[in-house]
Amino acid sequence: MSGDLLFIPGPVTCAQEVLAAMARPMVNHRGEKFAGALKGVQEKLARIYETAGDVLVLGSSGTGGLESAVVNLFSPDDVLLSCPVGNFGKRLASIARTYGADVEVLDTEPGQGLDPERLAKRLRVDRKHKIKGILLTHNETSTGVQNHMEELARAMEGHPALRVVDSVSGLGASRLPVDELGFDAVVGASQKVFAAPPGLAFVAVSARAWDAIAKAKTPRFYFDFTKAREFGADGQTPWTPPVSQVFALDVALDRYHAEGAANAHARHVSHAAAIRAGVQALGLRLFGDPRYASPTVVTMVVPEGVKASAVLKELRERHGVVLAGGQGDLKGKIFRMGTMGAINRDDVVRALTALGEVLCARGHACDPAQAGAAAEQEYVAIAQAG
Ligand SMILES: *Cc1c(COP(=O)(O)O)cnc(C)c1O
């Protein structure tokens, strides 16, 4: 059974082998088979995070992973510096506010990345170290922006605040060595780069974070990291886990490592470059500052006189191609096209051609064949530059 071509930034197309793992017979979640799979997942994720610390696996979507970081690391009234560059960064700030944190926002214009100098400046004037936590987004899925995490890590040097990073749509598509960069809680999820079904979040937790967790006072039960670590050491979770999702993620991570992290990074970069070339060949403008262009989500401006929702509907119904629109203030203003998941070059060419056909039919002057051709050329150019 083949479904639609999924070009939304999660959930994404899963390989058949990954889906097949979901159909395995159910097992005892306190037995050996499950422990083997969970330990496999923990170890394979630790290699991707490049950490010697703990990786906790939670039965939850990515948002639960973000919530878990907030409730475990901080106390009500803690001053947190939120640095959103789009909707998901704002969501993390909302979670923190929900649990009583005193959230200060360092705002960035949509389409821009976080300026390391601004962050450094804000931290420099916090001489008394009132700021207890810094909330960052690695890859902002709502705008197609990837922050420069190494520069941000340098900008935070010397300040003791805990660094929380939402890398739900970033982890695995570019390097994020969390120990080296000194990040304290880095959140990922199963349904993005790793191309497994939704249902699992994971968090890399630093030694410094564990000290804070022991003292933090925000109430928590389901997402208690201390319990998750205790059970995780035995290949278990405190509560009944989504067993089938763990099997699927284990297979997906095997596939990831068989490809190799560097090749996986290059795959996302080349799909993103090909999509950018294709949409520009259609006369569309890319959204956002190219210096921060994400490898996992390409964003483009909806052309004048075209109704975004109608384009998305027709793409889906007539061509079986599923793209995403804008969120929040960007609704109706941009299209978003993901590069994650088990998609290939032909899929990308097909999706771009379909986008061209739909736009053409709606009065936007363009040649749909040019989109595919430009994408193909980009793949060739990247392979030659090798
Ligand atoms: C997808 C995503 C999330 C989490 O979304 P869930 O729907 O809760 O899995 C969080 N942050 C970013 C940047 C994302 O792309």
Image: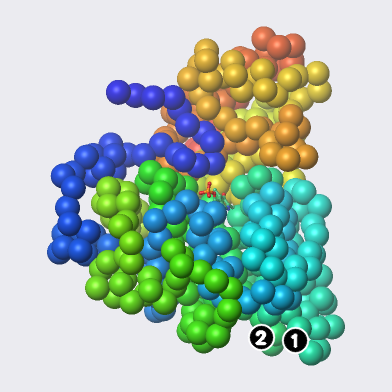
Q: Residue at x 69, y 68 (%)?
A: 100
Q: CA distance from mark 2 to mark 1?
A: 7 Å
For this view, does 382 lie left or right of residue 20?
Answer: right
In-front residue for pair 162/375: 162
Q: Which residue is mark 1?
A: 129
Q: Quadrant of residue 139?
A: bottom right
Residue at horizontal 73%, vertical 20%?
Answer: 307
Q: How many marks?
A: 2
Quadrant in which residue 107 is drawn: bottom right
How far from the left and from the top, in percent, is residue 145? 67, 51
Crowding at label 1, few (<14), some or many (≥20) Cα neighbours within 10 Å?
Answer: some
* Residue 110 or residue 265, whichever sits in front: 110
**What residue is disc 2 on?**
160
Q: Is mark 1 within 8 Å of ligand 1?
A: no
Q: Residues within 10 Å of mark 2 (few under 14, many from 20)?
A: some
Type of amino acid at the residue the image marks with label 2 = Pro
Comparing 123 with 365, the one in front is 123
Q: Position of residue 280 (x, y in %)?
A: 69, 31
Report whether residue 145 is seen: no
Marks 2/1 in contact by CB < 8 Å: the verdict is yes
- Asked where in the image residue 372 lies, by quadrant, the reply is top right
Ranked by sequence position, the earlier of labels 2 and 1 is 1
Kindly identify which numbered label has been placed on residue 285. none
Question: In the structure shown, which secondary structural element does the residue marked by tag 1 occupy?
Answer: loop
Residue 166 in view, yes or no: yes
Kind of residue indicated by mark 1: His
140 lies left or right of 173: right
